[in-house]
Image (cartoon, rainbow, N blue to C red):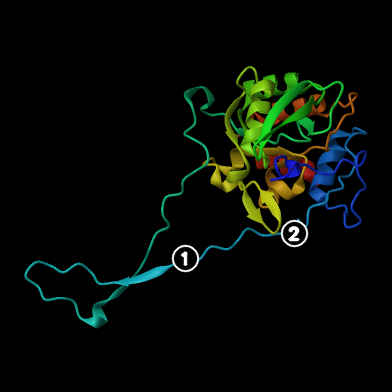
Amino acid sequence: MDNTSIITQVANPKEEDILSSCQEKVSQSNSSLKKHRNRSIFSPFFCCFRDYNAEPPATNNKTCSLPPPAEENSSPPKCDQVQVIPIPSPPAKYLLPEVSINDYGKNCVVIDLDETLVHSSFKPISNADFIVPVEIDGTVHQVYVLKRPHVDEFLQKMGELFECVLFTASLAKYADPVADLLDRCGVFRARLFRESCVFHRGNYVKDLSRLGRELNKVIIVDNSPASYIFHPENAVPVQSWFDDMTDTELLDLLPLFEDLSKETDVYSVLQSLRAR
């Protein structure tokens, strides 16, 4: 397993050439949302994922022919009495536990890690906030982690307003210790890693329908549109962050989330923003 397979990141244009196949894949809804914020940092995204126009895999409804139960002292049913009875889908094993008492009535916010809250590198960073040891194939490697500006204030406020969930496509062996250092106050009620994603058309997709929460009460904050291609209407997109210490995007998002925290249906706010 190589280093890059541990952390799921977008390409940093300062560190490597942008792939020639990269194209601007931000939807019109995302563009409208960024215009509403009216900040220069909300520039168009450039991503290197393979396909954003993907649909969730279709599920097949199975049916089974079963005879009706025989009444007492009656003969077995004849073939023409056989009924077609649909088999219900087995109960879903949701990714999240039941909502805690403290979070009852709150909307749920799913927050990405890499390039949304932090930027990590296997190359030494002189001003790293954390250095996390990660074991790969028997060898311990040091991961240098930079915190995005205002991330502490952002998480504190989000923890007050929402049921917060960390959802990253990176492996737990890296992301879990980073989350321990980043989230000192226990803002994240749950942490989900790569194994909780759906691998679809070359991308690790975060399927919000598997969380066990009403979708009209779920918001995903992520720098990668590929991560939420199943539920773009639930997304608050953010620009990928690498090392710009003047960045204020997390701070600028707080008024929007204060409004969303008061909504019983988050679509009403997100859709109205896209319509502007």
N-term mark: 1 or 2: 2
Say which of 259 and 238 sits in front: 238
Q: Residue at x 73, y 19 (%)?
A: 152
Residue position for label 1: 61
> What is the x, y in percent for residue 68?
23, 69
Q: Residue at x 77, y 41 (%)?
A: 9
> What is the x, y in percent for residue 104?
51, 27
Q: Residue at x 63, y 30 (%)?
A: 176
Say which of 156 and 263 sits in front: 156
- Amino acid beneath label 1: Asn
> On the rendered structure, is 135 left or right of 241?
left
Q: Which numbered dot is residue 117? A: none
Residue position for label 2: 53
Say which of 162 and 171 sits in front: 171
Residue 221 at least partly seen:
yes
> On the rendered structure, is 59 left or right of 246?
left
Residue 276 at least partly seen:
no
